[in-house]
Amino acid sequence: MLEIQKLTSAAGAFRIQDISFTLTEGECHAVIGPSGSGKSTLLQALLGVLPAQSGSILLGEKDITRLPIEQRGFGYVPQSLGLFPHLTVRENLVYSPRARRISLETAQPLIDQLVEATGISRLLDRKPETLSGGERQRVGIVRALASQPKVVLLDEPFTALNESLRRELWWLMRDLQQQRGLTVLLVTHDLSEAYFLAQTMSVLLDGRIIQQGDKATVFGRPVAGDVARFLGIETLLPGRVVNENDGLATVEIGTTKIVALAIPDRTKAVFVSIRGEDVTLQNPDTTLTSARNRLTARVVAIHEGSPLMQIALDAGFPLTALITRPSFQELELNVGSTVLALIKAPSIHLIARDAG
Amino acid sequence: MNLRTTTIAAALAVLLLYGGLILSLGWFFDGASLTNALWSERTLFSIRLSLMTATLAAVLALVVAVPAAYALSRFRFPGRSLVDTMLEFPIIVSPAALGAMLLIFFNNPLGDWIQTHAIQFVFAFAGIVLAQFVTILGVATRLLKTAFDGVPEEMETIARTFGASPRHAFFSVTLPLARRGLLAAFILAWAKAFGEFGATIMVAGTMAMRTETLPIAIFLRLSSADIEGTVALILVLVVIGLTSLHFTRRLMGGKAHA
């Protein structure tokens, strides 16, 4: 449906380079990256606000790389939403069909369906300034969908909302996307949002896409240290592979050795990436476990997060575990306590260090 | 005196100066003279002429200023900064000099040709409109540029992503969002044109019942030592001017720098 090939574009001194990815029909793809990674520049290049210096954008069979903004056929929900303040909600919703010269008889049934599905029927005669944050988001989404765009571009549309409202709108967006088979490109720095809404994703860092794939692979198997850092993996340390046997690698971190799944390129210098939720804590006298890595560790600090507790450990190297509150109480943990940290070999992801 | 007291005293001094000037008119105020002056055929002609020329000049100024201000607000083009600088030209050059320049232009071959084959400007109705137009065009463009600057460019981009052409986005989004600034620019330009004297007298002269706008009528009455009549006409000008400022401030939400 949307195919971007080696797209390069610049906003002032900053540029996005050789961006390539494909969206199939009915898919939600997230481009994730920290602030300043080039997400907005990418969107502006797709919308036609910034010219493409090289590469191409294909929408369906059509090359839209050089087309003006109004002929590209995207539905767009910007971060600011950009509802036209001088128009009522109803006038905002019919703006696109009118501008595209689609008769209201043709457009109205879809608008009515979307208005019904998003529960904004009582807002139609109101001006945007009188709406709450959540209502404005709903109107913004319906407006973007009103002219049946081939692809909907979402630019961090839920960032400004409180947590509960965000989750409510994620569900709404996911229902709309799945029920209507919408093709959506979501640009966000919010990992939870991307994980919830998207099926596939690209990680954008410093204007380049570093990793692409289905969301489970991207989140579970970052290909570079920078990606792992952005994904917020709690433990990311340099290590050295000292032995490989039967698909398992023994890795030395300082003086401590752990066992992980070996990586294909047989690199010795690696980053060891361990997600906090993959570290299980047990009493030191526990013997029954199938985990390959049994590390005696001392509790260094305890951070009360929600809903998980973050436990900083010294296991010969700094290690972070995320555990539930009941587990925390059951283990009677305190700073200075000794625990057994269990990590299964497949839960330890090795990243070749020359990958960044 | 502390800073607050000093600065407030300075602000009140401004009010005292202008308010005092207006109040001082009362010294020569005479109800009967005011009525006579106001309802005289010559005064009514002056008011009518000023209303017509100021309205025409303000409309023409907006016809040019709206696209010019939009270009200055949105686009980078060769000569942009020069155009931007020239907006203040009518302010730094005195209106009399501006009028003299127009007069000199109409004595050039091109100006002479225009007068002979198109429209007569010198000592004519069109000359008054032109003098006022030239005086107010810069300020109207400056005010409109500020109004367009206040409309986020993103709004136009969003409108275009919904299929609107740049022209459609301008008329359906930008212009309505700048409407307060547009109205304020019109009112201020109109008020300035209504009170314009220097350029008008240079181009159109002081012909009674022909090119005698309200400010020129004031000048002529003062020249003939008709103080009461002068006061009456000044009061008309003051009332119209202050009413315009009041509406402009209301439109701009109290932010007009009039």
Image (cartoon, rainbow, N blue to C red):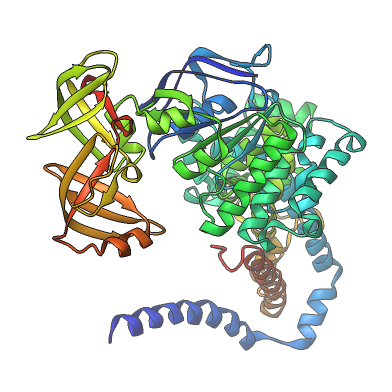
Question: Which residue is at the far left?
Answer: A255
Q: Position of residue A121 (x, y in %)?
A: 81, 55
The quarter of the rendered structure image containing the N terminus of chain A is top right
- Residue at the spot 25% in from the left edge and 47% down from the top edge: A320
Task: Using residue A235 as the reference point, say whether residue A150 is left or right of it.
Answer: right
The answer to which image quadrant residue A25 occupies is top right
The answer to which image quadrant residue B123 occupies is top right
Viewer-closest of B136 and A123: A123
Viewer-closest of B152 and A94: A94
Q: Is residue A228 above or below residue A48?
A: below
Q: Is residue A97 above or below residue B219?
A: above
Task: Using residue A75 as the reference point, say whether residue B258 is left or right of it.
Answer: left
User: Is residue B208 visible to us here?
Assistant: no
Q: Is residue A161 above or below residue A319?
A: below
Q: Position of residue A188 (x, y in %)?
A: 48, 39
- Residue at the spot 68% in from the left edge and 42% down from the top edge: A175
Task: Using residue A14 as the reference point, say whether residue A188 is left or right of it.
Answer: right
- Residue at the spot 22% in from the left edge and 52% down from the top edge: A312
The quarter of the rendered structure image containing the C terminus of chain A is top left
